[in-house]
Image (cartoon, rainbow, N blue to C red):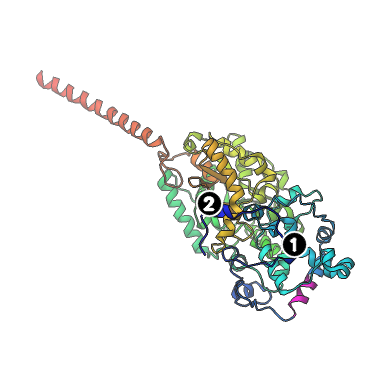
Amino acid sequence: MGTPKPEELIQKIDLTPQWPGWMDTPTEIKPGNFCWGAKAKDLDGIGFPNPREWNPGEEDWKLPENWKEIVIEGLRERLEKYRTLKVFMDICVRCGACADKCHFFLGSGDPKNMPVLRAELLRSIYRREFTTAGKILGKFAGARELTMDVFKEMWYYFFQCTECRRCSVFCPFGIDTAEITIIGRELLNLLGCNIAWITGPVNNCYHKGNHLGLEPHAIMSSLEYMIDDIEEYTGVKVEPTFNRKGAEILFITPSGDLFADPGTFTCMGYLLMFHELGLDYTWSTYASEGGNFGFFTTNEMAKRLNYKMYAEAKRLGVKWIIGGECGHMWRVLNQYMDTWNGPADFLEVPVSPITGTRFDNAKQLKMIHAVEFTADLIKNNKLKLDPSRNDHLTVTYHDSCNTARGMGFMDEPRYVINSVCNNFFDMPENTIREQTFCCGSGSGLNASENMDLRMKGGLPRANAVKYVNEKHGVNLLANICAIDRAALTSSMDYWVPGVAVAGVHELVANAMVFKGQGKRTVDLRGEDIPGMEEEEEAEEAAESIAVQEPQEEAAGAAGEEGSE
């Protein structure tokens, strides 16, 4: 089914209450609103249960006969293991403070996409199986039987949540509905009911070190293409190293930056900046992924995939780690790493070799964000910048959910952007920082078969971009997340045509003045920088005149000598 046009999609949104009640409203699994089911080879590759080929659009999901007992026992185990889950199941009073905060509800009008109601899908099973009131009073106590239709409904809506945690900002009881989604997905995983767009990357990362399944030679080849482009555009030849033991720093970025635009331009920005600084760093072709799709399957799988970065840091004998522009990498690191795999005592607290700044905020992780590193460089005047090179851009900034709400990382990216761009405008206050809207395609939902859902989920963010586009002429949406760079490109093309998407380090490299560079007439995309071509033509004309004048003088002198 083709994705509806923007005006058609908007006309379908209805936020008025619907009757009958939600328990009596059957769920229709609509094409364009769900992802393909997990493939057997991927489930088998990571040791997940019930590997088989299945289609969520078909009646038979090929579940074992005792599927119901497996789910209920799985919920029992997690209630005992995670105290927060038990608390979240009991304390919600259904006040509705979160109801209109979810981008999927605002974009679809589907009541079951209200965070409170999405959580009720699981909470109703909890009440039926684990509370006295639910066992006696049933529906009157908000309880219901776990049937196949109920199970499919849970699957449908738990994969219409990007775990962005915007709803948690507004909950007066502090309930983190994203954690409920995480547990809901764990229960679905017990029956092999994940989606291909998650289990495929997880299987690749588990066996190859990155979501795309890139082999070491493919990683190096991709970077070599970027190196050639950098030299063509700037005249600078960068020379990164790979798997080099004894380097001071290990650099890890999301694999999306190695493979697809506009992430590749961000990667070129890292390469140029590190080269200019003379940074003693190396890439790994084995721990070649900062992101963590395991976080969208089970806590245990997320723990495994997170550890590979630290295992590689230990193998190479580096002192500390810099991480690139990624979202869920940083949420996992800041909220889970120390419990799962830390502290990383075999590494040192990061100290910038360029500025001498000690990053005590990373004394447990031993890993800092690239934008944090760059902000410190700019503050200490270690980068020569010409912001006018970005004057053709009017920029706004999207706070990526995982770095903003997940780690409180809000001021540093803006500081960097304002240092390298002369035209910056924030979106409305209630759509940024802690209250930022999600890109609409995170948490493994950035597929092509669910484009209808993605465009619905992307509407609130796009609406805020459209506001600054119309008011200030914004034509670029910057961010520090690989998924955002991929997802927001489609969303902007759909909702706000003419607004491009870029990583922050692409803007940094465009503004940097490098030692030994040629004339910068193009940016990292190979596109002309407005005004620079005229400047180059003027300089060439001046050089031509300067050469011509001595020649004319010499010819005149020769004529005088001949007449004598």
The amino acid type of the residue labelled 1 equals: Gly
Image check: 113 left or right of 125? left
Judge whether residue 479 can be spotted in this image.
no
Q: Nearer the viewer, residue 300 or 283?
A: 300
Provide the residue designation for mark 1. 21
Q: CA distance from mark 2 to mark 1?
A: 29 Å
Q: Nearer the viewer, residue 236 or 30?
A: 30
With respect to residue 269, does 539 lie above or below? above
The amino acid type of the residue labelled 2 equals: Glu
The location of residue 429, given as percent across then percent down, is 66, 39
- Label 2: which secondary element: helix
Image check: 334 left or right of 450? right
How crowded pointer 2 is (Cα within 10 Å; few <14, some 14-19, many 20+) is rated as few
- Label 1: which secondary element: loop
Highlighted range, magenta: 66-74
Q: Residue at x 10, y 19 (%)?
A: 563
Image check: 32 left or right of 112? left
The location of residue 558, given as percent across then percent down, is 15, 24
Examine the residues drawn in magenta and state their main secondary structure: helix
Provide the residue designation for mark 2. 7
Going by the picture, which residue comes out furthest to the front? 19
